[in-house]
Image: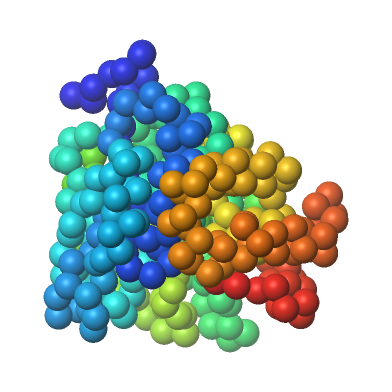
Amino acid sequence: MARKASGKTRFNIMIVGQGGRLQYEACLFAASLRAANPNFAGRLFVAEPQPGPLWENDPRIHNPAVLDLLSDLGAEILPFDSHAFGQTYPYGNKIEALLALPKGEPFLFLDTDTLVLGDLDTVPFDFDLPSASLKVEGTWPEIELYGPGYTETWKSLYDRFGLDFESSLDLSQPDEYWRRYLYFNAGFFYYRCPHEFGQRFLDYATEIRDNPPRELVCQSLNPWLDQVALPLVIHSFGGGRDALEPGYLDGDVTCHYRLLPLLYARENDRVVEALEQVTAPNRIKKVLKQYDPFKRMIYQARGHKVRALFDQDNLPRKERALRNTIKRNGFWMR
């Protein structure tokens, strides 16, 4: 049974961390979580892939300053082994790591490049009805001129797993328009048990990868595999696009910024202020400055030069246009 804290369901948070960029993003995430939620009742797990045959190099975090800061911020390193994905598909970390979380305890997965802005206890989660991020563009499938359309492509996947396709549709959207079909960004998702969710996610993702329906013959699954399998998993557990009220995650409570140049380009002043406040303490600064994009964007104020390139009230509709403008002006970093 889910444990309660202050009248709310207690839940754990999982992000993924490993050597390189993700270890510094994990520190920033943990700092923002503690700043905005000093009394968070759950556990924060930084899931860390372990070396093995699916990794060419050791993916673990070896930086002692990073490990010390994560520990000081209350994060727990959660080792897990890669059996299905590993280096060839690192997005699969979020799938395989779920099986290392405490069984039967509600969880919230968040991409590591997320900033926590507000009180997570205000988010009206129903952990029995999963959902995921609707901050998404129509990136998959890519429809070929003489190939299957959206309906035929998605229906083949629902049929493969014995799921009801019709009930997944948003009938307020036109036929063959991508928003009619259940599609999420995998930047966050949640459920009542990580083992139930993780095993099904793993089963669906590996089946799609290894034995795709013929309707997917023209479709790329790298890097989209997790986002192809995720709506099927959520639908199979009775969740969907309306299971969580909008405006909380990817809104007032969290910001999935993706990369710091994009944060400075498109997010509101509150997000920028939160970022700069949470990264100001010396114990956090001395670690984050080890990562050059953080050093330049935050501490050397390159982010504000990026921000000056855009009118935040009249941004380009497509992220690609933001990226191209930043790159043209020599400020792109990742």
Q: Would you say 63 lies left or right of 326 here?
A: left
Q: Residue at x 85, y 56 (%)?
A: 311
Rendered location of residue 85, percent (x, y): 25, 73
Front in this rendered view, residue 114 or 174: 114
Q: Would you say 191 lies left or right of 291 here?
A: left
Q: Is residue 278 visible?
A: yes
Q: Is residue 233 visible?
A: no
Front in this rendered view, residue 185 or 311: 311
Q: Would you say 311 lies left or right of 71 here?
A: right
Q: Residue at x 75, y 64 (%)?
A: 306
Front in this rendered view, residue 90 or 150: 90
Note whether 128 is above or below 116 in the view shown.
Answer: above
- Quadrant hosting residue 144: bottom right
Rendered location of residue 183, percent (x, y): 50, 56
Quadrant containing the N terminus is: top left
Rendered location of residue 57, percent (x, y): 24, 80
Rendered location of residue 58, percent (x, y): 22, 75
